[in-house]
Image (tube, rainbow, N blue to C red):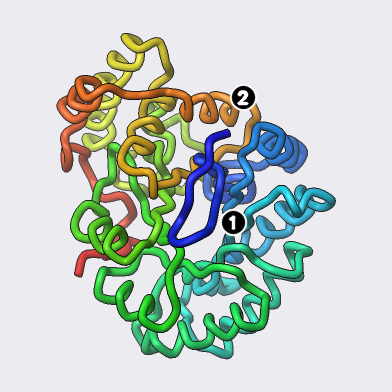
Amino acid sequence: MKQRTLGRGLTVSALGLGCMGMSEFYGPGDEAESTATIHRALDLGVTFLDTADMYGPFTNEQLVGRAIAGRRDEVVLATKFGIERGPDGSRNINGRPDYLRQACDASLRRLGVDHIDLYYQHRVDPSVPIEETWGALAELVAAGKVRHLGISEAAPDLVRRAHAVHPITAGQYEYSLFTRDVEDGILATFWELGIGLVAYSPLGRGFLTGAITSPEQLADDDFRATNPRFQGENFAANRALVAEIQKLAEAKDVTPAQLALAWVLAQGEGIVPIPGTKRRSYLEQNVAATDIALTAEELAALEKAAPRDAVAGERYAPANLPKIRS
């Protein structure tokens, strides 16, 4: 597996594994297969694993912790704090120093580890100056509980303010052929400051695999059913875009998912996509994308097939839509 460097010194596999869907959001889970998928990832050299305390909630960290027991030294482990979930399903953004200290200790217990390699602020709390949050995060680094710090879905000005308190190693943002918001200032800011980009949902939440041909395929507990891109006329328009991508994939003798991942990887050496899967077969297909080189002509053809802003519908339902533009 090829390696890439995030920020000024965190070396990770060029492709990571997003573990969220193993526990929630994308239909029913299967812990045995999910654990086998994590083990297979490590065997293939995919050592960068991504989770968060709010996935489950809490159960995804526990699953990952059980899966990596005995193999901790092979893993670059990333998790997140900042989104509290209540018993009633409510969500609250919390960036208070006392809260994040407790959250970190709880994550360490659930994961069964003595340190977190990359600890993200999952969402920025508008009620707490980011300097206060990052001052407390810097203390966690000094204490040895955390090795590197990350941020997610924050606008460029907040990125700069946080980075001034403690260097940011990586930012996690949605980035794919279907979602290119980070090109509006985030990438330029990251490259200027020496921050790496971890691209979540690089397959457009599965749309870019070509496997989803009807909204009826989504399980009742699959959150994509509430996602505007997977509804009504938006779905039909986006399915047409995927069909064009499929034609290019067939011409190159790769899968649409592999082509979409190769596109993300081609956008810069400081970018690491973390496609999520809970099945070994899809993991192995995704890993093969790291060996696909795209020519300038092929990149131009993809740009024509799926122009920026061509995707129909927002990437989240309105109530959950993060706003990252400054």
Tell me the quarter of the image containing the N terminus. Answer: top right
Q: Is residue 215 visible?
A: no
Task: Answer with left or right where residue 30 lies relative to residue 195.
Answer: right
Q: Nearer the viewer, residue 224 or 41?
A: 41
The residue that appears at 53% across and 74% down in the rendered structure is 84
Of marks 1 and 2, which one's residue comes earlier in the chain?
A: 1
Question: Number of labelled discs?
Answer: 2
**Label 2 is placed on what type of residue?**
Ser
The residue that appears at 43% across and 25% down in the rendered structure is 258
**Label 1 is placed on what type of residue?**
Thr
Q: Nearer the viewer, residue 310 or 268?
A: 268
Task: Answer with left or right where residue 276 lies relative to residue 174.
Answer: right
Q: Is residue 307 above or below residue 158?
A: above
From the image, tell me which residue sits under label 1.
51
Residues at marks 1 and 2 touching, judged by CB atoms closer than 8 Å: no
Q: Residues within 10 Å of mark 2 (few under 14, many from 20)?
A: few
Q: Nearer the viewer, residue 311 or 194?
A: 194
Q: Which mark is residue 282?
A: none
Seen from this angle, which residue lies furthest right?
70
Residue 61 pos. (x, y %): 68, 59
Residue 96 pos. (x, y %): 50, 87
- SS for dot 2: helix
Task: Answer with left or right where residue 220 lies relative to residue 215.
Answer: right
- SS for dot 1: loop
Task: Answer with left or right where residue 258 lies relative to residue 220.
Answer: left
Real-space CA distance between mark 1 and mark 2, rounded to the nearest whole angstrom: 20 Å
Q: Is residue 237 visible?
A: yes
From the image, tell me which residue sits under label 2.
281
Seen from this angle, which residue lies furthest front?
8
